Amino acid sequence: MSTSAAYIRNGDTTGNINAGAEQGWIPLLQGGGTIGFQVNLPATGAPIGVFNFDITDDEQPFNVNGHFLGFVTLTLAAPYSTTYQPTDGLARAVNFDFGPSQVVPSPSARWIRLRYARTSGGAVGLNVGVSQREGV
């Protein structure tokens, strides 16, 4: 099991987060399992935007010279694509879980990241934790 309580700490939602090609990548455990992103977004500043999840099989996504394949944004199903998204300026405390029994299966890629794409509003205060578990 791999856990990081502070994947994003006090993220500033007045701009995009992890928008650069080399930012925010987490290595996925190979051979199946689950990964979860615990998102806590306060209503301060009425943030409106979208949480996206990108995956890549590039060997070194942190290095601009390591981008051969680029990333693909996962297609999210409801509720991940609807009520979990900050489209109304209200606070969100949600878990985006990817795994065998979840709305979206665990992606089979080398890397994943959460990317926040701002539309309007926002403030400092987005917090995201991550946990991974190997397949059983």
Image (spheres, helix red, strand yellow):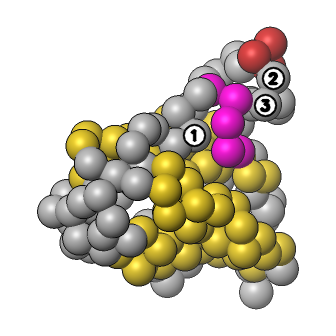
Residue matched to label 1: 18
Nearer to us: label 2 or label 1: 1
Q: Please name the predominant secondary structure of the magenta segment in the image.
A: loop
Q: Secondary structure at mark 1?
A: loop
Residue 52: percent from left, percent from top: 42, 49
Residue 40: percent from left, percent from top: 47, 74
The N terminus, quarter of image: bottom right
**Residue at point 79% right, 62% down?**
29
Nearer to us: label 3 or label 1: 1
**Residue at point 59% right, 28% down?**
20
Residue matched to label 3: 62
Contact (Cβ within 8 Å) of mark 2 with mark 3:
yes
**Does 46 sit left or right of 61 as displayed?**
left
**Residue at point 57% right, 40% down?**
18
* For marks 3 and 1 on the same chain, the one whose residue lies earlier in the sequence: 1
Packing grade of label 3 (10 A; few <14, some 14-19, many >=20) is: some
**Does 12 sit left or right of 131 as displayed?**
left
Residue 114: percent from left, percent from top: 54, 52
Q: Amino acid at mark 2?
A: Asn
Residue furthest to the top in view is 65
Residue bounds of the magenta highlight: 21-25
Q: How far apart, in angstroms, are the residues tagged by discs 2 and 1?
A: 14 Å
**In the image shown, does 56 or 3 lie closer to the viewer?**
3
